Image: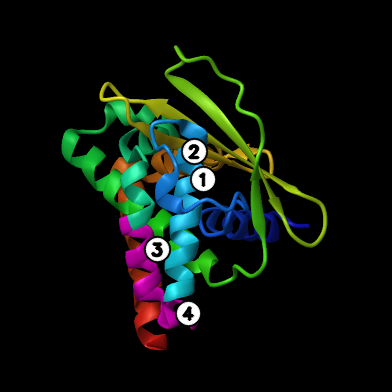
Amino acid sequence: MNASNLFLTKRAVLGAALAVALNFGAPAMAADASAPDLLIRQLSLETLEAVKADKSIQAGDLQKIIALVDTKVMPHVNFQRMTASAVGRFWRQATPEQQKRLQDEFKTLLVRTYAGALTQVKDQTIALRPLRASAEDTEVVVRTEIRGKGDPIQLDYRLEKKGSGVWMIFDVNVLGIWLADQYRNSFAQEIGANGIDGLIKTLADKNQKAAGGAAAKA
């Protein structure tokens, strides 16, 4: 598998993980979101139910899918930390305005990634692996497997516990590579060549092109 196909596979797996059921049978709202593994379960169940309930989403209405991801999943993601990790050492060199623009464009990029992958979800399921953490931990890794045709696929989440006791996702591991690590090298190359504003422009151009393509299909 070449690098391009591997990247597309990772994107599809990542989006699928946010959409499929966990096969525990309990209603989504019964999950305890104060526990990191049950938060992942709850997000998956609620997103799947929303997909099943909306025929437009099932038909591939990208704008509706984006709205679903933005409202259901993204409030549980610490985008500032995720973006800072992806930008790496250059984050501290960015002005507050540049940091905000980087975060906004990166969020748009990831929302569209998740949304596009949701249209590919079929019969996959996710199984939680035992959580290895103590009650005092403020950062944990929730390990899951995507099960469908073929071998199970590893998909893990890094979560942090905020002062309010709420758990937030700040990184995702797809096929053995953490999301922030995956973007860090390409972001560093772009910043090295064109500066922080160059990376912001590149992300904005990609998002604008994606939005234009979606509009043309509508």
Earlier in the chain: of badge 4 and badge 1, it is 1
Say which of marks 2 and 3 sits in front. Answer: 2
Q: Choose the circle earlier in sequence order: 2 or 4.
A: 2
Residue 198 position within the rendered picture, expressed as x and y whole percent measured from the top left: 33, 49
Q: Tell me if residue 48 comes above or below residue 151 in the rendering.
A: below
Which residue occupies the foreground of this view, 23 or 91? 23
Which image quadrant is residue 90 in? top left
Q: Residue furthest left?
A: 97
At x 37% / y 38%, what residue is drawn? 83
Element type at marker 3?
Answer: helix
The colour scheme used to paint the residues is rainbow
Closer mark to the observer between disc 1 and disc 3? 1
Q: In this view, does 207 lie to the left or right of 116?
A: left
The percent coordinates of residue 22 (x first, y second) are: 60, 51
Q: How far apart are marks 2 and 1 (CA)?
A: 5 Å
Q: Do the residues labelled 2 and 1 touch (CB within 8 Å)?
A: yes
Q: Mark 2 points at which residue?
A: 38
Q: What amino acid is found at the position of numbered circle 4 in the picture?
A: Gly
Which numbered circle lies on residue 41? 1
Magenta region? 54-71
